[in-house]
Amino acid sequence: MIPGAIQSQSIELMAGSERVFTDVQWLEFLNREMDWSLFSRARSTVDYENNTNLFTGAYLNYTTPSGFGGTVVGRIASAGSGVDTGVHYFKAGESFMMYALASLTLVQGPGTSWFSITRFTPKIDDKWKLYSSLELFSSFDYEQHQFSTQRLRMGLDNRGYQFGLAVNISETGKEVVHSDTNPGFFIRKQF
């Protein structure tokens, strides 16, 4: 891991064709060895008829030098709250970051889920970088698919300000009973 390459906070606003999406993320390493970390995020969506969806979660991680480790997640959302535990993989460098978590629901379950964020930000010159991000989330009870979400961002970065094209896609139900696509534009500030 490269300590200076990991930015610890970000705020994103995405205006889409169906709804507005906001996301605040925070990552803090809890010791000098950088094996204990706390990742926290708060997300909200508001459609153009004022229907809202909220989520906040805190991920306590222990990461070994190989990048693998254990995680405990506490979450509160519009659909309810819960506690999960699982195994994650985390690696970060100058132009990439990957966090992937497979987890089991301990409270308000039973269930399993997959969550991952991958970012690729290669330099163009001293001021500009390409910015790309893919986030995946899928939730299953022990009998069927509950819901999945994919969030894709493609754009540019200028000194910690990212902007460009965005799309959020969601599917719900056992056989994808409902699918929702929300294309738009995003602006994001990384601190």
Image (cartoon, helix red, strand yellow):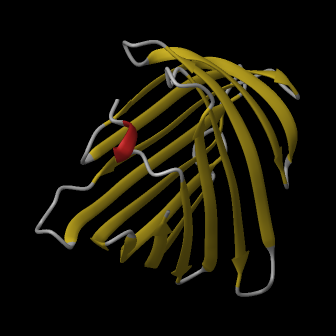
Confirm whether residue 102 shows in the render.
yes
Q: Give how far across and how far down residue 130 sits, in percent.
A: 22, 65
Q: Is residue 171 above or below residue 10?
A: above
Residue drawn 45% across the image and 34% down it: 99
For the residue pair 113 and 26, the one nearer the viewer reads as 26
Residue at the limit of the structure toward the bottom, as seen here: 48
Whether residue 122 sits left or right of residue 54 in the image: it is left
Q: Is residue 23 above or below residue 40?
A: below
Q: Quadrant of the N terminus?
A: top left
Q: Is residue 102 left or right of residue 108?
A: left
- Total labels: the figure holds 0
Q: Residue at x 48, y 71 (%)?
A: 189
Of 189 and 107, the residue lying toward us: 189
On the image, the x and y values in percent for residue 177 come to: 63, 51
From this viewpoint, is residue 183 visible? no
Query: Residue at position x 75%, y 25% from top?
Result: 84
Q: Is residue 68 left or right of residue 110?
A: left
* 111 to the left or right of 117: right
Q: Residue 152 is drawn in which quadrant?
A: bottom left
Q: Position of residue 71 (x, y in %)?
A: 64, 21
Q: Residue furthest left?
A: 125
Residue nearest the viewer, comparing 149 with 122: 122
Q: Quadrant of residue 148?
A: top right
The image shows residue 90 at horizontal and vertical percentages of 43, 28
